[in-house]
Image: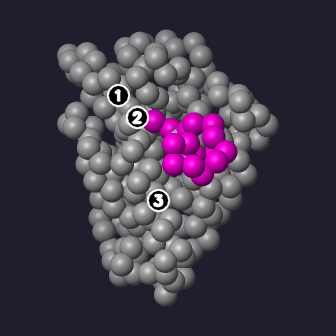
Amino acid sequence: MKKLQNILNNKKYQNNRLASYSYSIKSSFLQNIFITLIFFSGMMVTTLSYSQPYVPAHDPILQQVAKEVPPKEILQEENQKIIDNMVKIARNETRGMAGLAAPQIGVPLQIILVNMNASLEKADNSMSAKIYINPKIIWKSEEEVEEYFEGCFSTGSLIGMVPRYKTVRIEAYTRNGNKEEFEFTGYTARIFQHEIDHLHGLRFPDRMKENFDKLHWVEAGKMAEYATNFNNWDKKCSKDEWLSFINEAPPSNNK
Ligand SMILES: [Zn+2]
């Protein structure tokens, strides 16, 4: 999930990193306060090289259920190397990252990374990478759902308004092999829901349901314009177009 940046809120472009894609916009956008975070997602790359780590949006791995890591194997060198690589990718992602799931870099395992510093409220979203293995949502605040914008490193230049539970309780293994429980609310809870969805072959447009009129193509240089004009954005992406994009798009089709 792309990292959010405080684009507006009377501050205009404080941060050049906003030139990227994915983001979130507070659902109180009906009011005048307008906080836009940029969560960048998905570049169309097929290699696992360090500079281009993400698989393309149409890669079948992004629609498959990832395998659990046997708890006894978490400490094995092979798995620790995958984790180290995810952390390295997160720390070097200059566009801002809120989270990363292993399938996004071509690894079909249930491992996610969450940037614990990612926030809607503050502009400094420096990387604080935490790893969660075999994460499961064991409780969610079904009565409390919030909508906010999301983008993803695995959906090209799409931005959409996604409903998520406000609070979730997570059960997961740490990279040290300990099973723990965690509770998160607000934006961090959103990141967990986004990343755990990746482990089950889902991306944020798959959660939009009747909200598909709020799924838009937003070019990298148009984020500030979009943040002030998303209600009238004419580059909509229909559900059929989304399905076509992820099932048929050639690697070079980074719309
Ligand atoms: Zn994502």
Query: Which element type, helix, strand or loop, lies under badge 3?
Result: helix
Is residue 173 shown to the viewer in this render? Answer: yes
Q: Main secondary structure of the magenta part?
A: loop
Q: Is residue 47 magenta?
A: yes
Amino acid type of disc 3? Asn
**Label 3 crowding class (10 Å Cα cut-off): few <14, some 14-19, many 20+?**
some
Residue at point 71%, 42% (across, down): 58
Query: Does mark 3 have its CB less than 8 Å from ligand 1?
Result: no
Picture quadrant of residue 66: bottom right
- Front-most of residues 117 and 17: 17
Q: Label for residue 17?
A: 1
Q: Work out how far the residue at label 3 is from the one at label 2, CA to CA, in angstroms.
A: 17 Å
Numbered disc in front, either 3 or 2 = 3
Query: Which element type, helix, strand or loop, lies under badge 2?
Result: loop
Residue at point 53%, 20% (across, down): 219
Task: Give the residue at mark 3.
Answer: 85
**Label 1 crowding class (10 Å Cα cut-off): few <14, some 14-19, many 20+?**
some
Q: State whether residue 190 is above or below residue 218.
A: below
In the image, residue 243 lies at what x, y percent? 73, 38
Compare marks 2 and 1 and give the one earlier in the sequence. Answer: 1
Q: State whether residue 119 is above or below residue 116.
A: above
Task: Give the residue at mark 2.
Answer: 95
Q: Label for residue 253?
A: none
Q: Indicate left or right for 47 with 153 as reference.
A: right
Given contact means CB atoms under 8 Å apart, are the residues at marks 3 and 2 in contact?
Answer: no
Q: Is residue 31 magenta?
A: no
- Front-most of residues 35 and 39: 39
Amino acid type of disc 2? Arg
Residue range in magenta is 40-55
Is residue 179 shown to the viewer in this render? Answer: no
Q: Work out how far the residue at label 2 is from the one at label 1, CA to CA, in angstroms.
A: 5 Å
